[in-house]
Image (spheres, rainbow, N blue to C red):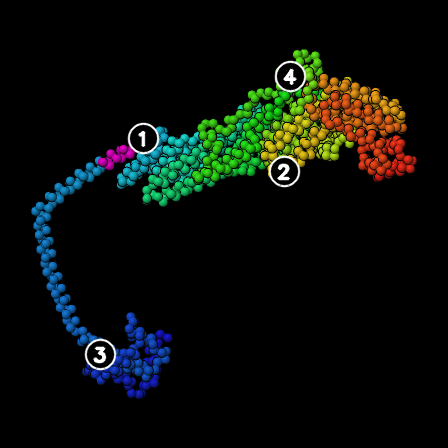
Amino acid sequence: MSLTSKLKSFIKKQVTTNEDSHPSPIEENISHELFNGEPAVAKFKHEQYRSNPQEDQETIDKIDKEYFEDVDPSLYELEKLPEVLNLEQVDDDRTRLRRQLQAVSKKVSEVVLQNHLAYAAELQRVMELQKTLQLASIICKNGRGQLAEASTTFTRTSLHLLANVRKRQQLHALLKSLRTIKTLQRTDMRLREMMEEEDYYGAIQLCLECQKAAITLKHYKCISELSSKLQDTLELIEEHLDIALSKTCSLFDVAHYEKVQMAYTLLGKRQTAVDQLHLHFTSAIQNAAFQIVLGYVELCSPSSDRQFNRLQYSDLCKHVTIESFTPCLRDLCKSLWGVMRSYYNTIRWHEEHDNLDTVQIDEDSSDTDSMNTVYIKQKLEHGLGRIWQDIQQKVRTYILGIDLSAFKLEEFIQFLDTVNRMIDIGEDFCDSKSEHLQDSLKQQSLNYFKNHHRAKMDELRMFLENEGWELCPVKSSFHIQHLVEFKFMKQTSPKKISANKNSNNKLADQSDSPIKRCKYFEEYSGNSSPFDIQTDTDYQEDVFAGVGDDNSGEEHSDSDSDVPDELKQDYIDELTGETHSRPGRRRYSRSRSYQKHVSIVTNTSLNVFRVIGKYIQMMRLLKPIAFDVMTCMAQLFDFYMYSVFIFFGTELSSMDERQINNRLRSTLQRIHDSLIDDVHEVDNMEDPQHTEHREKIAAPHLSPIVDLNNPQKRFGLPERIVAAESLVFLGEQMEFLQPHLEAIIPQNKKAFLQQFYSQTVNMAAELRKPVYWTVSTNVINYDIILQHMAAVKWDIKEIMSQHNSYVDVLIQQFSDFNSYMSELCRHMPVPRATYDQVWDQILRLSARTFVEGYGNTKKCSIEGRALMQLDFQQYLKNVEKLIDLRPIPDREYVEGYIKAYYFPENQLEAWLPEHREYSIKQLLVLVNAVDHLNRKARQRLVNMVEDMDKNSRR
């Protein structure tokens, strides 16, 4: 309820209630105050004298705290009234407030009286201040009057003079400003001249000074246009500076780059410069790669109307021809090498330059310069990987652009050498393994090598089927290192490779520089590049023997009448495929000479040597597929070895197969199962059976020109010697290559290499036995000897002093064959191992013939056994004179059979089970021929031999 409503309600209520009653106390007091002669204040003063101090203090303490704040007391008391007013309550409030007012007034009066002296003193100070102000006003009035008089007399003239002087000074300043403006207007031409002179530092410095001068003259309206022009000129200088910076990406020049860096330092944009430099390097890589490939595509493209420059780089690479692929790759790598060399020189420049700057920087700018140096260093180091990734991607795209299956092996090796050199440079550049480039190279190499090896295997089969097994006239000192395919082995060896690795590790450990020293960039610091190294295609092989090349020191034949016709024929050069006449016939001594070490090579084995050399080059250049190449190289040796066996060693009978040891038999069986295709007729190339045997190759057939059944040529003994000994020589050269192969193939694949050498290469010499066995069995007519022995009576009663004629017949055949061997030595080198192997087999067969002849004897006396002993001793005596082979093979075999005749029963019974080398028939004949045995003992021994035969058949 509002205050007005409360009052109206109160008044209305009082009027209604007290119309006829006495006046209220309020009305009575109002009438006393308003109409009586005594005022209210007087009454208030009269009432206050009746109060005491203690009551007054209690009254003041009871005053509401709101009265001590900035409030309206009347309004405050009225708002406190309740909604329903009570007269008595209101009167009590009025009395209370009056009492409080009285107490407060008394208190104030007492305080005023206490501070009366201070009040009087302050009032005195105010009066004195008033007097001082009046005096100051008079002084100011007098001064103004005097100043007005001075201005009238002389000040105006002096001030006019000063104004003229000031005006002259302003005109001089204006003239100076106009001259500066004129100079600024003429600066544009000078700036352009400095940019043409590539004096970017001076141009920027002059432009910045002009801008500072323009700022001081900015109050002139013409300066605004000039300032804008200077800003445009500065931006133009920065554009030219950016172009100059981009030129360093392709050809780094120290002086030029130093000018550019000084200009960017003056601009305070060194960080911006290094960021921009990386963009330019990326652009340089793209432009260089595209322009090189585009040039070759346009040069070799038959259609000149096609616009190749609009193609993407990946599409452009697909248009490179096979003929131009290698030179284009070489030029591409040269161009990208130039970019990497420029980046490397840039890093070296910053490394040296920033080291100098850190010493010469001021204290105020040390923090900023240090931050710039750290930023540039980090940016350049991170940029190494980025630059190489871009280059690697360009080379990878180019490599995968076309199919390289039509490449010759020499061309593909050159391609591998170039790409591997690029990979080495990348590792030297930023320690990158170039996984993407390695994968693409591996992909192309596997595709190429798979087809190439198949073609080489077919080529080897063709060589073998057309091989006449004639001696290729190479020098007696021939070694695979003399071939051009193995020229790389004269420059590198396993020890050198490991030594180079150790030296590289030491150089890496000793390098304390934050930017490592790279061997390629240190070696090719000039205009040369690693890709300028060309393969020495003019290298001439000196492997074929000429006249006088025999180093035996013995006399040479002056006539070629005794030279076989096959040695007079032309030969085929495996490198070119052309036919050439012999560079000279190698003549051998007329005296018999069996050489311990001899180089016997055929056209086919020489071709195998060349292919192996190229394969090893591929293994060196492409480590990821080194094991695959090694496997294929092993197949070359396996196929050659198996071909020699099926040509010359498969004529063994079931009895003769014992000449092949188990290891050799296992090796030949493994080669047959893994490499030889038994499917001979496949009409459809898409036939499923053909697909299954595609990785295998059909066994070759012996050339018709090789006659292995001619007794005059001793059943092809010269051809057999050339075949077997060329295989042995091939194995010896493979053993020489073993350390090089171990250094190339992965560590986890060396077990295969060891197995290949132990199970295959080492078995090459064992193949002599089956190859020469046919000669050994046919060159001597053992049947005639057996017939002569069968005609001899061994049950004689007297001891003979003359040996039988069959010994002379056998020795004569030995003599004839020995003469043939001596004659053969004049026409071709016969290794000592061949001589020993052939005679070892002949003598062993002769020993078997002796035992077989003695075993066919039905009756034999003691004198007959003595004759057998005499015949065999005569045989040994002549053999020792005729044949240079010690000890005589199987001598104990024959002597033991003869001496067993004299054994007593018990010794013979113990001897029989211990000598299973004799046949059952021979043992039975021996037991039946012993005449000092009774019938019972003989029958018991016969039964024992028969039991031995039964047990052996189980």
Residue 476 is covered by the magenta coloring: no
Q: Of callouts 1 and 2, which one flags the residue occurring earlier in the amino acid sequence?
A: 1
Up the image or down, 551 lies above or below 381; here it is above
Front-lying residue, 232 or 458: 458
Q: Residue visible at 79% across and 25% down?
A: 873
Q: Which residue is mark 2?
A: 749
Residue 681 visible in the current orientation? no
Q: Depth-wise, is mark 2 or mark 3 nearer the camera?
A: 2
Residue 602, percent across and down?
Answer: 67, 22
Q: SS for tag 1? A: helix
Residue 187 is covered by the magenta coloring: yes
Query: Residue flagged by tag 4: what amino acid is it?
Result: Glu
Q: Residue visible at 35% across and 29% down?
A: 197
Q: Of callouts 2 and 4, which one flags the residue occurring earlier in the amino acid sequence?
A: 4
Assess whether mark 1 and mark 4 are in contact (beta carbons under 8 angstroms): no
CA gap, disc 4 and disc 3: 162 Å
CA gap, disc 2 and disc 4: 48 Å
Q: Of callouts 4 and 1, which one flags the residue occurring earlier in the amino acid sequence?
A: 1
Query: Residue flagged by tag 3: what amino acid is it?
Result: Lys
Query: Residue flagged by tag 1: what amino acid is it?
Result: Arg
User: For the magenta stretch, what is the residue range?
Assistant: 176-188
Q: Of callouts 3 and 1, which one flags the residue occurring earlier in the amino acid sequence?
A: 3
Give the class, few, some or many, for how many residues have Cα within 10 Å of label 2's Cα (few <14, many ≥20): few
Q: Which residue is mark 3?
A: 106
Query: Residue flagged by tag 2: what amino acid is it?
Result: Lys
Residue 299, percent across and down?
Answer: 53, 24
Task: Look at the image and tell me in which quarter the C terminus lies.
Answer: top right
Q: In which quadrant of the rendered view does residue 629 lie?
A: top right
